[in-house]
Amino acid sequence: MNADFSSLTPDRVLDAVEQACGQRCTGVIRPLPSYINRVYDVEVNSGEHVVAKFYRPGRWRREALLDEHAFVRACAADEIPVIAPLPFADGNTLGDVDGISFALFPRRGGRPIEPADPGDALWGRLGALLARVHRVGERAPAPARLTLHPLITTTADLDYLLDNHFLDARETKRLETFGMDLLEAVEPLFREVETIRLHGDCQHTNVLERPDTGVFLIDFDDMMNGPPVQDLWMLLPGRPEDARVELEQLLEGYETFRPFDRRTLELIEPLRAMRMTYYLAWCARQARDAAFLQNHPDWGSRAFWAKELAELESQLRVINGEDEEIEEDEDYSQPEE
């Protein structure tokens, strides 16, 4: 996933923004933190600021980006607090600069949520927000987006790791065995499970709070089709049995606006294993990226794989009811977009 942003000079960014929004820029441009994409705060002559997001080349097809835009704009049309892409002067929401897709967004500030004790009313508000998003998500498919399923996404992640020789022979065998055992254990649980459009990466860093709108979702970059429980479990402060009160309040808020199939709570630990596998493949796709290697110098070493494989195998034992604990010192979320 090596991206070529070399042509994206400040002048090219300003030219793209001016052409898209039909306004002149003041020349004030400030890069914003983003590992995956390139994001800039740009001031236009009206004094307003827009956020220009240039998507990493090769990561998503144009159709997939348009699926994202359609979902977020539909949420905004239902007055759900999200940050929807701005329409360009020609009515589109997605442009192109030297083969790099880009979109414009309004600038919105907010503070990261900080759920406190289990009695914090924030849990109910989060559940209500996700239910409203899912009511929009169930109205239409996202055909160009991934579908979260062990036989689709997890199989692709395992194949990428195994086919590109990131592990030695012994480690490869362990990963193959883990993959076969995981798919055998969890695939039956996903049969006949509801699949809708989701945020997909709904961790607490992607939920902000403002005095005027309350909690709102940001960064739909990884939106997908999948079971609704995917958008709930990553918000929890621990495993379901250790966060019973928080989970119940999350579900109560959710069920105020939309029914929730509580049988799908059994998918949480399989989804955690799938997320762990996805994260390894996500990193592997960047393993030759200079910035990634600088930030993760030990990635791919024998010690690295020994630790990761042990954690995957431990998580499989949790799924099979053979083990109650697994060390959780690894962050399987992506860096901020």
Image (cartoon, rainbow, N blue to C red):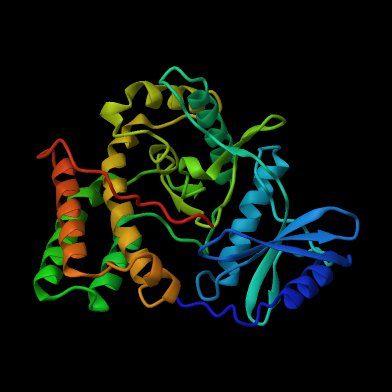
Rendered residue at 72%/74% (across/down): 10
In this rendering, position of residue 312 left or right of residue 130: left
Asked if 167 appears above or below 272 in the picture, the reply is: below
**Which quarter of the figure has residue 176?**
bottom left
In this rendering, position of residue 173 left or right of residue 194: left
Q: Quadrant of the C terminus?
A: bottom right
In this rendering, position of residue 28 left or right of residue 264: right
Q: Quadrant of the N terminus?
A: bottom left
Residue 270 placed where, x, y %?
26, 46
Residue 49 placed where, x, y %?
79, 54
- Looking at the picture, tell me which residue is in the foreground, 317 or 327: 327
Residue 242 placed where, x, y %?
28, 27
Rendered residue at 78%/59% (across/down): 87
Q: Is residue 169 visible?
A: yes
**Which quarter of the figure has residue 66?**
bottom right
Residue 41 placed where, x, y %?
72, 59
Rendered residue at 48%/26% (across/down): 123
Q: Is residue 138 visible?
A: no
